[in-house]
Image (cartoon, rainbow, N blue to C red):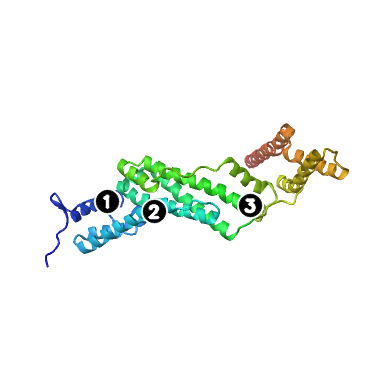
Amino acid sequence: MPSHSPVVFGQLSVYQILTILVEYLYKSKVCVSGDLYKSKGLIRSHPNVLDLLKTVHAGDDVKGFTKQVKLLVRHATANTSRSLAMAVTRQRFTSNKLAYYESQMARLAANFAITSDMAMSIGGQLKFAEFISGRYADVLSNLYLGYANLWYYKNYYAEGHDELLTVSMEQILYDTQNSIYDISNNFPIRPVGWAMKAITFPFGKCYSAPTDDMRRAAASTITTPTEVRDQFKQNMFISKTPEDRLAMLEEAFPLAIQADDILKSLRKQRRDASESEAKVIDYVDELREKIIQVDSHEVLGRQYWEREILGKVWLLRAFVRGIEIRVLGFWDV
C-alpha cells in the first residue's frame, strides 16, 4: 500500500511546523534554563504540553510527538466546543437557584479552561504580564468562591440563604465575566484576544451586577431574626460583659424589632402607647444611646487618652527612671 505523506506547506510539513513551534515554546522562558523537570506551572498544569515537550527533548520520538500533538489538538477542540456549547445551553431560568448557578459556573469554568490554553501562545512572557496573570487569578478565585457558595447552600441551607446566594453569586458571575473580558481586551497577541472573546462570550456580556432590591433582600436576612443570622452567630464570640458593645447589640436586637412593631401599630391605630409598650420603647432608646454614643466623642477620646497614651508615657518614664537608678548605682560602686 502506498504510504500517505504529510500535508506540506511550502517546503515544510505540518509536523515540522509544529515541531518548530513547540521548540520555540520549549526554549522560551516557560522553562527554567530549558530543564523540563523544573518547568513552570503553565506547562505542568496542562495535561499534554509537558509530555509533548519531552518528545521534542528526546529528539527522535516522532511517534510520541504525533500522539501528543493529536491529544493537544483534541483537548483544545474539546475546550473550545464546550465553551461555545455552554454559551448556548446554559440555564436561563432561576426558579431552581442551585441548578441555575451550577450551570453558570460550569460555563465560566469552561471559559477559564480555553482562555488558559490560549494563554500559552505568549509562552514565558505571561509571568511578566502582571495585569493579565492577575486577571486569571481573579477568575480562578471567583470560581472557587462560587463553588464554595453552592456547596454551603446545598449542605447547610437555612431560611434566608436564597437571598444571600442570589446577591453573592450575581456579583461573582459579574466580576468573572468582566475579568475574562479584560483578559481578551488586553491580550498581547490581538488576534488571540479576539478569538478568546468570540469563544467565551459569543453573544456578548450576559451577567449584571446585583440590583438594589437584591442587596436589600440580602441585608434583611441579617437585620431580622432568621436562621441565617443564627448561623452567623454560631462561631462568633459574644462577651457576657453587659458593657460590651457586641453584647449590647445582641440584647437590643430583638427588643428593637419589638419596638418597631409597636411604633408601627401605634401609627396605624392612632393611639398612645400603653405602659408596657412605653417601657419597651424607652429601654430600646436607652440602649441605642449607649451603643451609638453620638455625643460622647470628646469624653471617649479623653478617656482613651488618659487610659492608653498617658498610661504608656508613665510606664516609659518609670522604665527610664529605673535605668538611671541602676546606672548611678553602678557608678557609686
Q: Which is nearer the N-term, disc 1 or disc 3?
A: 1
Give the residue type at disc 2.
Ala
Q: Residues within 10 Å of mark 2 (few under 14, many from 20)?
A: some
> Taking 47 as reference, is 59 left or right?
left
For label 1, the SS is: helix
Mark 2 to mark 1: distance in Å? 30 Å
Give the residue type at disc 3.
Gly
Mark 1 to mark 3: distance in Å? 51 Å
> Taking 158 as reference, is 179 left or right?
left
Residue 86's tag is none
Q: Quadrant of residue 304?
A: top right
Q: Is residue 125 above or below residue 296?
A: below
How many labels were placed on the picture? 3
Outermost bottom residue: 1
For label 2, the SS is: helix
Quadrant where the image shows the N terminus: bottom left
Task: Please give the name of the residue rendered at 74% of the width and 52% of the height, measured from the top-left corner.
Answer: 240
Give the residue type at disc 1.
Leu
Q: Is residue 25 above or below residue 260?
A: below
Q: Which of these two is toward me, 194 or 36?
A: 194
Task: Please give the name of the residue rendered at 12% of the width and 50% of the height, measured from the top-left corner.
Answer: 11
Which residue is denoted by mark 2 in the rendering? 85
Q: Is residue 158 visible?
A: yes
> Taking 93 as reference, is 316 left or right?
right
Outermost right residue: 275
Which residue is denoted by mark 1 in the rendering? 25
Quadrant where the image shows the C terminus: top right
Q: Position of residue 217 (x, y in %)?
A: 62, 45
Q: Which is nearer the N-term, disc 3 or disc 2?
A: 2
Q: Which of these two is toward me, 92 or 226?
A: 92
